Amino acid sequence: MWVRPGSFPGAAVAGRTRRPPTISMSYDHEHSDETFCEVNKSSTSAIADTESAQAKVTKPETRSRKWLERVKSFAPLLALLVLSLLIGLRNSRFFDFFNFVRIANSAAIPLVLALGATFVILLGSVDLSVEGILALGAVVVAILVRNDMNQNSFGWTAPIFAIIAGAAIGFLNGFVHVRVRIPSFMVTLGSWFVGIGLATLILGGRNARVLDPEIRSLALTRFFNFPLAVWVALGVLVFAWLIERFTIFGRHVLAIGGGEDLAVLSGIHVNRVKVLVFTLAGAFYGIGGVLAAAQLGQGNATIGDGRLFSTITAVVVGGTSLSGGAGGVLNTLVGVLIIAVLGNGMVLLGISPDIQQAVQGIIIIIAVASSIDRNRMKFVK
């Protein structure tokens, strides 16, 4: 029997029961898409609001941080001015011209030594061989010029040999440091005693008096009322400043101190730069040895005693960071002047030498605490 489609009752019911689920499923899918879009829009707007709020908070923090960094860079200079003013108010002789000459003369050798140490510290390394290289340089120049131990009389050639000797030990410091991968403070600690041992071996434990008037003129001859040693130190300062500011080598030193891994990725020959830095520092220490021999009129193995502490103190007090990458030779000049002014002021005020050493120790602790970038330090050992 033929039946017209849809005339059978069950067929109509079956048709009606199939359509609603299809319609409802289509409706639910469209509704879920709309809901998802609305959620995305709301979450995106929430993230944007959060980022804008963070940006508003970060800008003032960034500005304040930059302002603090600027103030921090001028802090050593302000400290020098305030210190000079306070001492001058307590003792008017501090502002006497000849007292300034004494300060400059006492700062000449520490400045030369500190300039050499500055480049090493800018790398993030430490050089403890200051006293040993200075002693060796002083002994070399003392036995090569007119003296009371032999018949040598090399004149101005002798300081060249002293500088070469200092540069040679500095080169060995850098070479052993980068090749054997020994920490710089351990290598230079050993070379400190090597330098003193060589100086003692050369003189046999005695003193060599410098009788050459040309070498002695560095301390005795004056130009515009200042000893020649002061002008030599200023010349070394200008030389170091030119290296730091206008040479690729100077920029590489700062880059390595700021981040050695990034410097390697940038194509900088890190090991080569390190060796050159230690060599340059050794040459500066050799110049300091020449000035010390001229100033004291003799050379011996103990002529550099106490120079290490004043050297590192001057560099750190000037604002050069022990972690490297921040500071410079002009900062070191300010640090040397702070130490020299402080020492001169305490003498004028009648403070005992023991208290002077205690004050210098407190100063270096404060300077190190203020120069450390704690954001770059995960652990303190």
Image: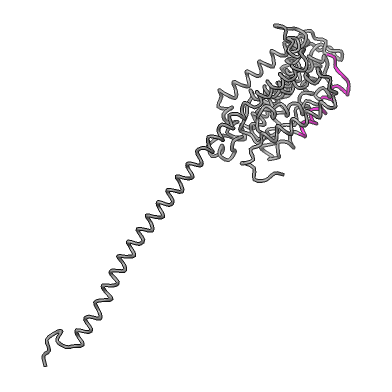
Closest to the observer: 104 or 141? Answer: 104
Residue 204 magenta-highlighted: yes
x and y percent of residue 335 in the render?
Answer: 69, 24
Picture colour scheme: one colour
At a point 74% along the width and 30% down the height, the residue shown is 363
80 or 122: nearer the viewer? 80
Was residue 34 drawn as part of the magenta stretch in this picture?
no
Residue 192 location, quadrant: top right
Is 53 drawn above or below residue 235 in the view shown?
Answer: below
Q: Where is residue 94 in the image (x, y as percent from the top left)?
A: 75, 14
Horizontal side of residue 303 vs 366, given as left or right: right
Figure disc tally: 0
Looking at the rendered image, the quarter that the C terminus falls into is top right
- Residue 239 visible in rendering: yes
Residue 288 in which image quadrant: top right
* 235 sits left or right of 92 in the view: left
- Comparing 171 with 65, the one in front is 65
Q: Is residue 29 left or right of residue 73?
A: left
Predominant SS of the magenta segment: helix
Return the residue found at the far bottom. Answer: 1
Residue drawn at point x = 51 percent, y = 42 percent: 57
Instruction: Name the residue nearer the viewer: 305 or 207.
Output: 305
Q: Where are the magenta residues, as a range?
A: 189-209
Residue 223: horizontal and vertical position, in percent? Answer: 71, 6
**Image coordinates for residue 282, horizontal then vertical, percent:** 71, 26
Tell me: residue 139, above or below residue 97: below
**Can residue 155 be seen in this snapshot?**
no
Say if 216 sits above or below 58 in the image: above
Dividing the image into 4 quarters, which one contains the N terminus?
Answer: bottom left
